[in-house]
Amino acid sequence: MTRPNILLLMTDQHRADTFGAYGNRCSLTPVADEIARTGTRFDRWYTPTAICTPARASLLTGMAPFRHKVLANHERNVGYLEDLAEDTFTFPAALQEAGYRTGLVGKWHAGHERTAASFGFDGPDLPGDAWHNPVEAPDYLAYLAEHDLPPYAISDRIRGTLPNGGPGNLLAARLHQPLEATFEHYLATRTIELLERYAGDQERTDDPFYLQLNFFGPHLPYILPDEYFDLVDARDVQLPASVEETFDGKPPVQANYSAHWAFDTMPRETSRKLIAVYYGYVALIDHEMGRVMEAMERLGLVEDTAVVITSDHGEFTGSHRLHDKGPAMYEDIYRTAGILRVPGQEPGIVRDEFVSLLDCTATFLDLAGLDPSLAVDSRSLLPLATRDEVPWQEDIVCEYHGHHFPYPQRMLRTDRYKLVVNPESVSELYDLANDPDEMRNRYQDPELADVRRRMSRRLYELLAERGDNFFHWMTSMHDIGEVSYDPMLSGLDEATYPQTTPPGALS
């Protein structure tokens, strides 16, 4: 087979530091760690935006969120588009045209009206907007009935108290089902069935396949059976250093968001238990990934299949006194795991270039022998699945547009520093070499004035080059140096560009 199959194992709201390959000492992810050991581990893998639907739409299209314009999840949408335009480029359409079978099992959440089937994916029809496992989905209920398994039932709920006195969001609970009845086991089973179908087809046609398994977890609420709910002893859990966050000098929205997630209404012992249960969820998912990889081996597909493991974004789990994700561009939710294993590659490669979930799109196209530039904001990662020196951009831009409410942000991350521009509030600058937990906002620190000025200019240039009109706010409100055009774009000022120069271009 000249073109490999492609298997994407994707989780939701998954911290990079839960993987053994990324330094976790609990040894909860042997399957993912083995793929990292035999493939390429990316240590600076970022999501384009830490919110489900926009990130997944970016993976689908290879476009940054500002470009595809699907900017919030449907269930909390405050007026943004909810589906991609009909004529938008997507990688599954390109793969299908090139002869690939395409399948997707699990969470969709890349739009609202248009489902995975709308984009030509095989697989069971599951709700697209759920943040909880859709345990009332007809295909799941049929699976339980087929195997004589008990229905979903929970107890031991963990939640705080909202500022208005109401019950907080459900964060975790004990599941009264055996492992075989869990939604995660169901998803892995359906994936294995599709693998068997594709493997049978290949014996007749030799057509390659793309298959994506999207777990709904370890997104909260963490709903687990006993053996995983109690897998990790909460007494052994260390709270993150940033649990001492005061929000001093930070955008006020962060303290508001902490209250929304009711962090301070729960004792620290509860926070430790939540982290312990989150670890258990990670272990459960890794176990189910192992079942899929065992099926790959049984079906003789391993040598002909590229494997990617990643997530749409991370999770706070108490970091900065927060849960979930939201309007705070911390490493906890923007840096995720990214693992790639390509058939025939040298094992044990580790890269520290800044790469993105977005780059999966061009990588899939490249693997299929197609033009990676069709994914306009994406770069193929195949050159990095080697020990070669590869020219690569030395920083990365991420963005956010809001969820419960509009809240635009842009971030520039370099080797040492992170700049976050918050138009409605104070902006942020962190020295990650001396402050890896991002506790001290040094945006106004005179010692870092040159860093702030240099990074502001760099972010401004990158946004303008991409066509992200957020740069217009920076033109007048941030120290980005001189510009050689009329910021009013009136065409009536002597500083206006010549007509041959694209509007928004830089000198």
Image (spheres, helix red, strand yellow):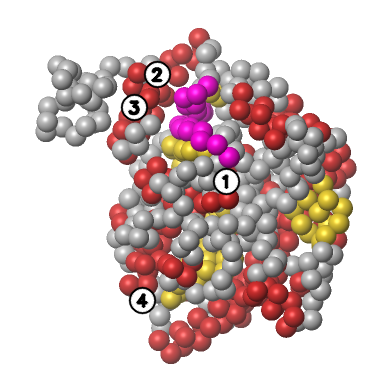
Q: Amino acid at mark 1?
A: Arg
- For the residues carrying marks 3 and 2, which lies nearer the camera in this image? 3
Estimate how packed mark 2 is, as few (under 14), some (14 to 19) or many (20 or more) residues with alpha carbons within 10 Å.
some
Q: Magenta includes 411?
A: yes
Dot 4 corresponds to which residue?
99
Residue 76 badge: 1
Q: CA distance from mark 3 to mark 1?
A: 27 Å
On-image quarter of the N terminus:
bottom left
| Residue found at x 82% / y 70% | 178
Q: Of 129 and 173, which appears nearest the observer?
A: 129
Q: On residue 472, which mark appears?
A: 3
Q: Earlier in the sequence, mark 3 or mark 1?
A: 1
Q: Residue at x 71, y 38 (%)?
A: 261
User: Does residue 121 appear to the left or right of 329 in the view shown?
Assistant: left
Q: Does residue 227 appear in this view?
A: no
* Percent coordinates x, y for residue 85 in the rendering: 36, 56
- Single out the mark in the foreground, 3 or 1: 1
Q: Amino acid at mark 4?
A: Gly
Query: Which residue is under mark 2?
Result: 478
**CA gap, disc 3 and disc 2:** 10 Å
Q: Amino acid at mark 2?
A: His
Question: Residue 185 appears in which quarter of the rendering?
Answer: bottom right
Label whose residue precedes the other's in the sequence (2 or 1): 1
Give the extent of the magenta segment: 404-425
Instruction: Name the amino acid, label 3.
Output: His
| Relative side of 278 to 270, left or right | left
Residue furthest to the top? 446
At 54% from the left and 57% from the top, the residue drawn is 109
